[in-house]
Image (tube, rainbow, N blue to C red):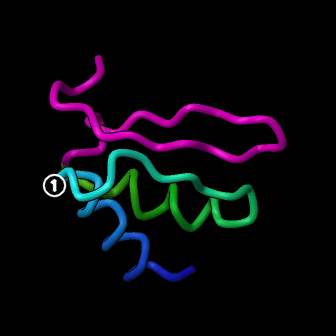
Protein backbone atom coordinates (compact mmCIF):
# COMPACT_ATOMS: atom_id res chain seq x y z
CA UNK A 1 0.00 0.00 0.00
CA UNK A 2 1.30 3.46 -0.86
CA UNK A 3 0.18 7.04 -0.17
CA UNK A 4 -1.67 7.42 -3.48
CA UNK A 5 -3.76 4.30 -2.82
CA UNK A 6 -4.54 5.43 0.73
CA UNK A 7 -5.57 8.89 -0.48
CA UNK A 8 -7.86 7.29 -3.08
CA UNK A 9 -9.47 5.06 -0.42
CA UNK A 10 -10.00 8.04 1.90
CA UNK A 11 -11.57 10.06 -0.91
CA UNK A 12 -13.90 7.16 -1.75
CA UNK A 13 -14.95 6.98 1.92
CA UNK A 14 -15.58 10.74 1.92
CA UNK A 15 -17.77 10.64 -1.20
CA UNK A 16 -19.75 7.65 0.04
CA UNK A 17 -18.52 5.31 -2.68
CA UNK A 18 -17.26 3.13 0.20
CA UNK A 19 -19.20 2.88 3.46
CA UNK A 20 -16.22 1.47 5.38
CA UNK A 21 -12.71 0.22 4.81
CA UNK A 22 -10.80 -2.48 6.70
CA UNK A 23 -7.09 -1.73 7.26
CA UNK A 24 -4.79 -4.60 8.17
CA UNK A 25 -2.31 -4.12 10.99
CA UNK A 26 0.70 -4.15 8.63
CA UNK A 27 -0.80 -1.24 6.59
CA UNK A 28 -1.94 0.82 9.58
CA UNK A 29 1.03 3.19 9.89
CA UNK A 30 1.08 4.29 6.23
CA UNK A 31 -2.72 4.67 6.33
CA UNK A 32 -2.56 6.71 9.54
CA UNK A 33 0.25 8.96 8.23
CA UNK A 34 -1.88 9.98 5.24
CA UNK A 35 -5.08 10.27 7.29
CA UNK A 36 -3.79 12.61 10.02
CA UNK A 37 -2.53 15.09 7.42
CA UNK A 38 -5.97 15.57 5.85
CA UNK A 39 -8.10 18.62 6.60
CA UNK A 40 -11.15 16.38 7.15
CA UNK A 41 -9.27 14.10 9.58
CA UNK A 42 -11.93 14.52 12.31
CA UNK A 43 -14.61 13.09 9.99
CA UNK A 44 -12.98 9.67 10.00
CA UNK A 45 -13.68 7.13 12.71
CA UNK A 46 -11.40 4.16 13.25
CA UNK A 47 -12.77 1.17 15.12
CA UNK A 48 -10.04 -1.10 16.47
CA UNK A 49 -10.36 -4.79 15.71
CA UNK A 50 -8.75 -7.84 17.21
CA UNK A 51 -5.14 -8.25 16.11
CA UNK A 52 -4.48 -4.55 15.50
CA UNK A 53 -6.62 -4.13 12.38
CA UNK A 54 -8.85 -1.04 12.10
CA UNK A 55 -12.22 -0.49 10.42
CA UNK A 56 -12.56 3.09 9.11
CA UNK A 57 -15.80 4.94 8.44
CA UNK A 58 -16.51 8.50 7.30
CA UNK A 59 -18.84 10.63 9.46
CA UNK A 60 -20.89 13.55 8.13
CA UNK A 61 -20.31 15.43 11.39
CA UNK A 62 -16.73 15.70 12.68
CA UNK A 63 -15.99 13.97 15.94
CA UNK A 64 -15.03 16.18 18.85
The image position of residue 7, as x and y in percent, is 33, 70
Q: Is residue 37 magenta?
A: no
Residue at 74% in and 64% down:
26
The image position of residue 54, as x and y in percent, is 61, 44
Which residues, given as a range, are shown in magenta? 40-64
Q: Which residue is mark 1?
A: 15
Say whether residue 31 is left or right of residue 58. right
Residue at 56% in and 52% down:
22
Local crowd size for mark 1, using a 10 Å CA cut-off: few (<14), some (14–19), many (≥20) = few
Say whether residue 26 is left or right of residue 46. right
The image position of residue 11, as x and y in percent, is 24, 63
Residue at 15% in and 55% down:
15
Quarter of the image where the N terminus is located: bottom right
Q: Which quarter of the picture shows residue 9?
A: bottom left
Quarter of the image where the C terminus is located: top left
Up/down of 3 relative to 19, above or below: below
Q: Is residue 44 magenta?
A: yes
Secondary element at image label 1: helix
Say whether residue 12 is left or right of residue 22. left
Residue at 42% in and 70% down:
6
The image position of residue 51, as x and y in percent, is 84, 43
Q: Which quarter of the picture shows residue 40?
A: top left
In the rendered image, the residue lying farthest to the right is 51
Up/down of 9 relative to 35, above or below: below
Amino acid sequence: MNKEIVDDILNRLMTGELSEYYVKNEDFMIFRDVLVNRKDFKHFRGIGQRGGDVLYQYLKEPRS
